[in-house]
Image (spheres, helix red, strand yellow):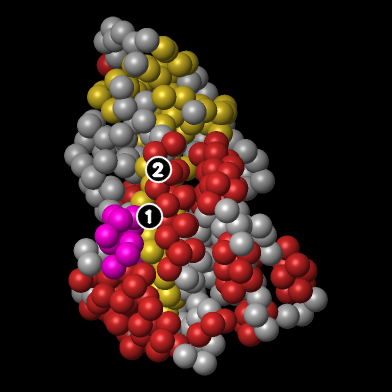
Amino acid sequence: MSILITNIKELLQVRDTNITIVKGKDMKTLPILKNAYVLIEHDTIVEFGCMDDFESLEADEVIDAKGKIVLPAWCDSHTHIVYAGDRTQEFVDRINGLSYEDIANRGGGILNSAETLQNTSEDDLYAQAAKRLREVIKLGTGAIEIKSGYGLTVEAELKMLRVIKRLKFDFPIHIKPTLLAAHAIPKAFKNNKDGFIELVVNEMIPAVANEKLADYIDVFCEKGYFDLEDTNRVLSAGIKHGLTPKIHVNQFNAFGGVSLGVKHNALSVDHLEELSDDDINALQQSQTMPVALPSCSYFLSIPYTPGRKIIDAGLPLALATDYNPGSTPSGNMNFVVSTACIKMKLTPEEAINAATINGAYAMGISNLYGSICRGKKANLIITKELPNYYHLPYAFGDNAIETVIINGEKY
């Protein structure tokens, strides 16, 4: 199967060489071809250029994209879309004055989701997650990371990861699975956090590694959840079993988690709503990707990640949704890009770089995803007719997407 897209008004994120990360001031540059074409064969981008230089090319299908923008599909490097039910009551509770911490302290939050998931069959859990996955693909997501962490028992965590494995098999989208075993302290270990850490290190991680169900190991490093010592133990155990570290860190407090992540060569450090100069300095000495989750800040009314400070320090930045039932019940990367511009003061170019090539880097797949480059996977968004690409973040309430192509096929 081959597809030729012609007369493209603006072709975004065009790279002649396979750039895998964009940092600092370079994030302000978004390479563009106007009046362009792209040729896809099977699942791969094989050629692109300006229509002025267009030579006769044959394809099974020709798409006329006159007046439309074409760009790489979004790369969402932080989600929790495998969950059961919802937490709408907690949403109302927050409106009535309770904080996220208040709700968690009375047994809500993650523990609420864990109890629901433990009582949900694998098939039902799969059906709920598959519906969400279809929705985010239609919204332009072409690669996605999915975490466990709403199980909190060996059996339930394995159930979540087996659902993710089924999604990988059944959907064309590229999926990276993460074991987030240390997401919260379950009720059974309320007064025995060390006992739960022992369970994670000695049973959960080996079981997951034995079944090859995850690529990454993650921890919620936060006051009231898992401290630096806990995080170090879990990440070290994950590394021992071949899992690459990622960390939820600095969502509410900054107390050294970023430096610990850098010490363990974490692929990414995610949230960063609170960020110190020491954190910036640590990241400057690393290959770790800072990841901002602006939809979470929007939904919880907490500070936004200081993306301007991160980029101005010469660092890269990725954007992701944090799609989950408690703090971000949305997987809309278009809204994430808009919110990064509106609330974090990123330029449209910076936001698009953060949501494509740098998002792919935060999943370890930017060698094949995240830019328009010969030899990369053909995961593309074709918009409706738009004035220019600034319209994508500007018209934050519109669905500007007309067609999504995943692995060279229209979804």
**What residue is rendered at 40% in x and 43% in y?**
168
Q: Residue at x 29, y 20 (%)?
A: 41
Pointer 1 residue: 177
Is residue 304 among what the camera can see?
yes
Residue pictured at 72% horizontal, 70% vertical: 90
Residue 70 visible in the current orientation: no
Distance between mark 1 and mark 2 Cα atoms: 9 Å
| Disc 1 secondary structure class | strand
- 224 or 322: nearer the eye? 224
Percent position (x, y) of residue 359? 37, 53
Q: Which residues are drawn in magenta? A: 206-217
Q: Residues within 10 Å of mark 1 (few under 14, many from 20)?
A: many
- Residue 213 colored magenta? yes
Tell me: residue 113, above or below residue 130.
below
Q: In terms of depth relative to the viewer, which is nearer, 179 or 153?
A: 153
**Quadrant of residue 316 within the rendered picture:** bottom left
The three-letter amino acid code for the residue at tag 1 is Pro
In the depicted view, which residue is nearer to us: 289 or 208? Answer: 208
- Above or below, 162 against 277 in this view is above
Q: Residue 334: x and y, percent? A: 54, 47
Sequence order check, earlier mark of 1 and 2: 2
* Residue underneath mark 2: 168
Q: Is there CB contact under 8 Å for labels 1 and 2?
A: yes
